[in-house]
Image (spheres, rainbow, N blue to C red):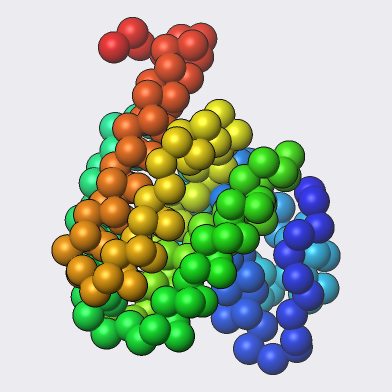
Amino acid sequence: MPRFLLPVEKNNLSDLAYQSLKQALLSGRFQPGERLVLRDVAADLQISLTPVRDAINHLIAERVLDRGPGGQKGGATVPRLDAEQFRQLMLLRADLESRLAEAAARHIDPDEIGLLQQIVEKMREAIDRPNKNTYLDMHRRFHFSLYAHARMDVVLDITETLWLRCGPALNAVLSDYVPNLKRRDYHGEAVEWLRKGDPAKVAESIRRDVTEASAYISRQLEKEGRDTPGSPVK
């Protein structure tokens, strides 16, 4: 298991382990079907098994992770989403995130728009790197930095859970999706509409970013389903 989880301080360990795992999932650093073993996660975080077990149980309760076949002990599994499950999650994302983006555009100040532009530039620099983790980190940071200005905490919490469930599927196909990202930069467009003070256009840019990614990744998941031995032909 790669050591990408940062060690945490020895206080509120369960919460901190939960946050660390959540950030890794949000950034797509786990693959669909990947097994998270308690002792390996604990070693990465440099803490004991108990807070890691609590954190993983929390994520299982949120349906972000699966217990695994037969309720396996000692860890959890990153779920494999089928195309229809993914489409449903992304449908919710497109609706909620466009609402968050429009609300954020009504409250954000010029300095914060400048910070979003900096994130977009880092995304452009990272897009051609073989390791896509930096791009995924910047991608997540852009969206949630924007949505933080919406003043819609309940909607933001729900959106984060949707991202947690979608992250691994996005990571699995990101390299193939790079040409689409280069063709149309919806994040850059959103920043331009923020500068022009047009909340509806900001919302449209975010909605199209989500819906186009959804359409592409859903097609890939459908193909994987057809190519998997024993899968029903749809």
Residue 202 x, y percent position in the rendering: 26, 62
The outermost residue toward the bottom is 11
Residue 25 in the figure: left or right of residue 86? right
At horizontal 58% and vertical 55% (from top left) the residue drawn is: 123
Residue sitting at x 48%, y 71%: 116
Residue found at the very far left of the displayed protein: 200
What is the count of numbered marks? 0
Residue 154 at what x, y percent from top left?
Answer: 26, 77
Residue 41 visible somewhere in the drawing: yes
Q: Is residue 72 left or right of residue 218?
A: right
Q: Name the residue located 55 percent from the left edge and 36 percent from the top edge.
A: 178
* Left or right, residue 72 beside residue 224: right
Vertical placement of residue 32 versus 227, above or below: below
- In the rendered image, which quarter is residue 12 located in? bottom right
Seen from this angle, which residue lies furthest front? 196
Front in this rendered view, residue 20 or 150? 150
Closer to the camera in the image, 74 or 206? 206
Q: Which of the 4 quarters of the picture holds residue 217?
A: top left
Work out whether 181 lies above or below 93: above
From the top left corner, tell me how far across and down residue 168 is, in percent.
Answer: 53, 45
Q: Is residue 71 above or below residue 97?
A: above
Inspect this view and state whether residue 35 appears.
no
Q: Residue at x 48, y 40 (%)?
A: 181
Residue 162, by quadrant, is bottom left
The quadrant of the image that shows the C terminus is top left
Image position, residue 48 (x, y; %)? 77, 74
